[in-house]
Amino acid sequence: MQISYSDWLTPQFVYITLSAVVAVLIWIEGEMLKQTDGKLPQSKFFKVSSLLDTLWFFISVVILYVIDLTPLAIAVPAAYGIYTTFGWIYGTKLLKRKGIPDSPKDLVIPAKYIAYSQSFSLVFFCVMFARIEFSMATDITIAVTNIPTYYHLCRLI
């Protein structure tokens, strides 16, 4: 049985896979913020990762309208949009309690917001991983179309 890349490498699969990468980046950002006690790390990785997280919100909104997602896969961009929107609201509320600093260098991300972000990233990643694993194990199409099994991938090589 020969499986071509076009059978399983769909825009939906790419989006869901990249969403899992974004979830891991959110977790790493949280760990970096914990190490600096909430102060923004000055590393280039942190800046690029934060920018990517923000851009992913807009990409997720566009994905809802551009890609023909399966009904269950629609939950991925919807969940990310809800997380980001509520994150902005929650973060603003937490910052108002402590006062908004004059400079970004004085900004301290509250521990509660870091916990919120990392909780989301953990659940978001696990749901996507479980969805892909379930699809592969049962050969039932849920989030992606016709993902090849490990056996099929080895035969392609």
Image: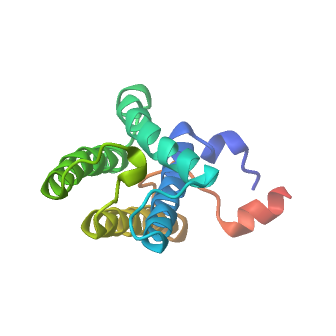
For the point 40% across and 69% down, which residue is it?
122
Q: In terms of depth relative to the viewer, which is nearer, 92 or 78?
A: 92
Q: Check the image and report above or below for 114 versus 72.
A: below
For the point 25% across and 68% down, which residue is it?
112
For the point 23% across and 47% down, which residue is it?
100
- Where is residue 58? Give x, y as percent: 39, 33
Q: In terms of depth relative to the viewer, which is nearer, 155 or 68?
A: 68
For this orientation, the residue located farthest to the top is 66
Residue 152 appears in the picture as rendered? yes
For the point 45% across and 59% down, which residue is it?
26
Q: In terms of depth relative to the viewer, which is nearer, 124 or 10?
A: 124
- Where is residue 121? Give x, y as percent: 40, 63
For this orientation, the residue located farthest to the right is 157
Q: Check the image and report above or below for 10 versus 80.
A: above
Task: Say how the picture is coloured.
Answer: rainbow
Q: In terms of depth relative to the viewer, which is nearer, 81 or 85?
A: 85
Where, quadrant-wise, is the N terminus in this rendering?
A: bottom right
- Where is residue 23? Give x, y as percent: 46, 59
- Where is residue 150? Give x, y as percent: 69, 68
